[in-house]
Image (cartoon, rainbow, N blue to C red):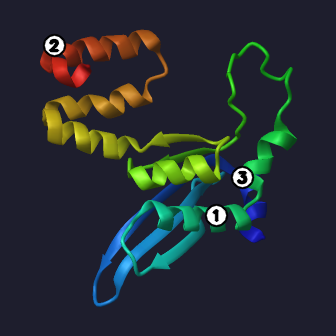
Amino acid sequence: PNANNALKYCRRVISVDACHMKSSHKGVLYMATIQTATNNIMPLAFALSDSAESGPAWAEFLKKLDETCPYIKSAWRTNYSPTQHDDIDDGDYKSDFVFVSDRQKGLIKALGDIFPDQLATNCVQHIKSNVASLFGAKASEFVFKIASTFSISEEECLFDTLHKQSPRAAD
């Protein structure tokens, strides 16, 4: 109940991740966190599993998160006002929350199954690591710059510069 109540006062970005425990206690630690209004990281939920990271394990964890924090699904219903942002065409977007994660395939499917109306996106750090391994460190330097710009013209300029250095990375 406390985590659910706290969601009303936090930023609407939920980070979900898992880490593999390699000590004498093997298994996977699943975690959901959120950033408070005072920039502190607050855990919403965590779970330990003795099996490998998988779609069914993620689904089980996310179902428990949904049970513990029903505000995640209900927030848009209580805060949504059709006239509040009538200049924005957001299609079927109905959520106040965004889930950020790595690109683990089982997790992406589980998020869509358990939180179908929520927006999910990928962690910029994971994207940067992937770009570095595929296209090199110089190309990866552009990832944070592109992700953090609010200007379309600046984004286009950054992509043009990236395209000159690494055309495949820009594509």
Quarter of the image where the N terminus is located: bottom right
Residue 12 showing in the rendered view: yes
Residue that label 1 marks? 63
Label 3 vs label 1, nearer the camera: 1
Mark 1 or mark 2, earlier in chain: 1
Residue that label 3 marks? 72
Disc 3 and disc 1: Cα gap in Å?
12 Å
Circle 1: is it few (<14), some (14-19), or many (20+) Cα within 10 Å? some
Label 1 vs label 2, nearer the camera: 1
Image location of residue 135, percent across then percent down: 15, 32
Question: Which residue is painted at 37% across and 68% down in the image?
Answer: 19
Left or right: where 21 falls relative to 110: left
Give the number of the disc on residue 164: 2
Vertical relation: 120 (above or below) 10? above
Image location of residue 154, percent across then percent down: 39, 14
Disc 3 and disc 2: Cα gap in Å?
43 Å
Circle 3: is it few (<14), some (14-19), or many (20+) Cα within 10 Å? many
Question: Which residue is painted at 32% across and 40% down in the image?
Answer: 127
Image location of residue 91, percent across then percent down: 68, 22
- Could you tell me the amino acid type at mark 2? Lys
Disc 1 and disc 2: Cα gap in Å?
46 Å
Image location of residue 72, percent across then percent down: 72, 52
Question: Which residue is painted at 22% across and 19% down in the image?
Answer: 162
Question: Which residue is painted at 65% across and 68% down in the image?
Answer: 64
Left or right: where 133 falls relative to 144: left
- Could you tell me the amino acid type at mark 1? Lys
C-beta proximity under 8 Å, tags 3 and 2:
no
Vertical relation: 80 (above or below) 45? above
Left or right: where 94 falls relative to 25: right
Mark 3 or mark 1, earlier in chain: 1
Front position in the image: 138 or 22: 22
Circle 2: is it few (<14), some (14-19), or many (20+) Cα within 10 Å? few
